[in-house]
Image: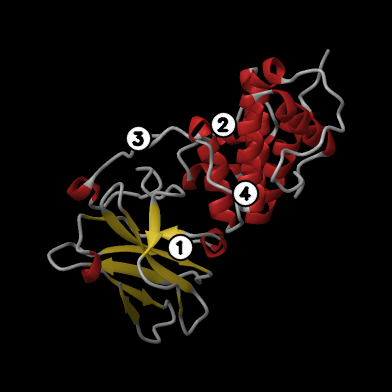
């Protein structure tokens, strides 16, 4: 019986490594993402193809660059879909890299690397895949249009005022590529990091905090809107990002983020 392709095994191992560095349980991952505990168990054990968005979200939670895992995801997705088998010609494994590109490495396993280069020598489809991997791993050119991830997948769960008081993760507003920082990250006197986040897709803003202590809180406010707050209530929350509920359709220049230390040493506030 044939086992998983090496590309899929490499992706699974990479996912497990990133998840281990987050320190989060499967239940905690489920609470921080739109994917269930059982889904994460299947993704991390190679029992089920993992969505690209799940890879991106795991890297975002771990505060790690997603390029290497997304390169592996491209290869694994080609195996899951059957594209790899149909596009792979019988040419020597030592085929030269595509003209004008750097060697495919940075964590891509040797067998997967040979497959990618061989396919690139004889197939336009695989050549596009190789370009996507090189871009993700080495910061190369733009991602080919025919391999771009589907726009707005999954669809955002709210927009504008309808986002008021809702969780940015569960509404898919905080996915990588959908949210940006408004202004710089700030370091508080106690060592916590805070920043204001804004999603153009959802037209909503919220606060993000990390390295906080149990009892600390972060509150975001805007003129004419109800302030939204998150309180760090458990030790597990001190090792991950925590988010306030969103403020829908705020003026970007009117957002105010305040850090309220549990020790009661005085609030620290930052404007967008």
Mark on residue 189? none
Disc 3 target residue: 155
The residue lying toward the viewer, choosing from 134 and 50, is 134
Contact flag, marks 3 and 1 (Cβ < 8 Å): no
Disc 2 target residue: 39
From the viewer's perspective, is the residue at label 3 or at label 1 nearer? 3
- Structural distance between the alpha carbons of marks 2 and 1: 26 Å
**Quadrant position of residue 62:** bottom right
Decide: is 30 above or below 123.
below
- Structural distance between the alpha carbons of marks 2 and 3: 19 Å
Disc 4 target residue: 67
The residue lying toward the viewer, choosing from 194 and 238, is 194
Q: Find residue 206 and report its horizontal and vertical position in percent.
A: 32, 60
Which quadrant does the N terminus fall into? Answer: top right
Near mark 3 (Cα within 10 A), the count class, few <14, some 14-19 or many ≥20, is: few
Of marks 1 and 4, which one's residue comes earlier in the chain?
Answer: 4
* For residue 114, side relative to residue 170 (left or right): right
Asked whether residue 48 is in view, the answer is no
Near mark 2 (Cα within 10 A), the count class, few <14, some 14-19 or many ≥20, is: some
């Amino acid at each position: 019986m044939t086992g998983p392709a090496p590309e899929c095994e490499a992706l699974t191992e990479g996912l497990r490594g990133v998840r281990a560095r987050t320190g989060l349980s499967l239940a905690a991952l489920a609470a921080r993402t739109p994917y269930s505990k059982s889904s994460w168990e299947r993704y991390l054990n190679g029992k089920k193809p993992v969505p690209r968005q799940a890879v991106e979200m795991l890297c975002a939670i771990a505060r790690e660059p997603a390029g290497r895992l997304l390169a592996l995801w491209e290869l694994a997705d080609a195996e899951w879909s059957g594209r790899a088998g149909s596009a792979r010609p019988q040419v020597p494994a030592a085929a030269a890299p595509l003209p004008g590109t750097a060697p495919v490495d940075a964590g891509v396993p040797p067998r997967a690397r040979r497959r990618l280069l061989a396919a690139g020598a004889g197939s336009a489809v695989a050549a596009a895949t190789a370009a996507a991997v090189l871009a993700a791993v080495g910061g190369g050119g733009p991602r080919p249009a025919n391999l771009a991830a589907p726009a707005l997948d999954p669809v955002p769960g709210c927009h504008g005022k309808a986002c008021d008081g809702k969780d940015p993760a569960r509404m898919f507003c905080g996915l990588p590529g959908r949210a940006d920082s408004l202004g710089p990250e700030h370091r508080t006197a106690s060592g916590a990091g805070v920043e204001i986040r804004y999603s153009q897709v959802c037209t909503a803003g919220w606060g993000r905090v990390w390295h906080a202590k149990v009892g600390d809180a972060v509150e975001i406010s805007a003129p004419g809107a109800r302030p939204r707050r998150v309180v760090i209530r458990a030790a597990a929350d001190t090792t991950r990002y925590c988010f306030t509920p969103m403020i829908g359709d705020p003026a970007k220049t009117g957002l105010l983020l305040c850090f309220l230390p549990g020790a009661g040493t005085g609030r620290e506030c930052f404007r967008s």
